Image (tube, rainbow, N blue to C red):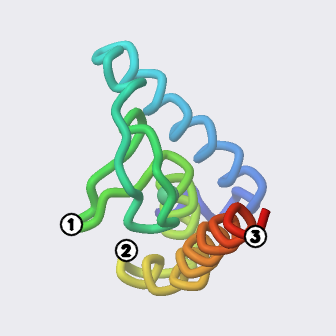
Amino acid sequence: MKDNDNRTKEDIVEEMTKVVEQMKIDDLEERPELIDEYFDCSCCGQTKSYAGSIQYGEYRLCNDCVLLAEIGFALNKFKDINELIEAMEDKRLEEICNFIKQDELRHRN
Ligand SMILES: [Zn+2]
C-alpha cells in the first residue's frame, strides 16, 4: 500500500488503536452479554473479555493483543500470527510465573 509511505509509525499506532477500540465497542453494541464472557488469550495468556477479541487461524486473541497484532502487521514487524504468538511466549511465561508467585505468597502468609 502506497499510502503507508507517508504515515509515521505514530500515525499507524494511533489509527490502529482507534480501529481496535472500535471493534470492542461494536462487539458490545451487538452482543452486550459479551461483557461477562471470558477466555484465555492465546497470545498474552491472560483471562480476557470476548468483546473485541478476534480469531486468527487457530488462535483467539484478546482486544489488547489484537492491537499488538494489527500494529505489528501494519509496521511489518511480523508476517503472520505465529510469529507474534512465539514472540509473546515470554509474556505468557511471565503471566504463569506471576500466578505461581502470588499463589506462593498466599501460602506463606
Ligand atoms: Zn491477549
SS type, badge 1: loop
Residue 30 appears at what percent x and percent y?
29, 15
Q: Nearer the viewer, mark 2 or mark 3?
A: 3
| Circle 2 crowding by C-alpha within 10 Å: few under 14, some 14–19, many from 20 | some
| Circle 3 crowding by C-alpha within 10 Å: few under 14, some 14–19, many from 20 | few
42, above or below 26, in the image: below
Residue lying at 45% horizontally and 68% vertically, measured from the top left: 43
* 87 horizontally vs 61: left or right: right
Q: What separation in Å lies between label 1 and label 3 (alpha carbons)? A: 42 Å
Front-most of residues 94 and 30 = 94
Residue 108, disc: 3
| Circle 1 crowding by C-alpha within 10 Å: few under 14, some 14–19, many from 20 | few
The amino acid sitting under disc 3 is Arg
SS type, badge 2: helix
Residue lying at 68% horizontally and 53% vertically, measured from the top left: 13
Give whichever of discs 2 and 3 has the lower sequence position. Answer: 2
Front-most of residues 108 and 14 = 108
* 12 horizontally vs 67: left or right: right
Q: Nearer the viewer, mark 1 or mark 3?
A: 3
* Marks 1,2: beta carbons within 8 A: yes
80, above or below 6, in the image: below
Task: Report the residue marked by disc 2.
Answer: 81
The amino acid sitting under disc 1 is Gly
Residue 106 appears at what percent x and percent y?
70, 61
95, above or below 46, in the image: below
Give whichever of discs 1 and 2 has the lower sequence position. Answer: 1
* 2 horizontally vs 17: left or right: left
SS type, badge 3: helix
Give whichever of discs 1 and 3 has the lower sequence position. Answer: 1
The amino acid sitting under disc 2 is Ile
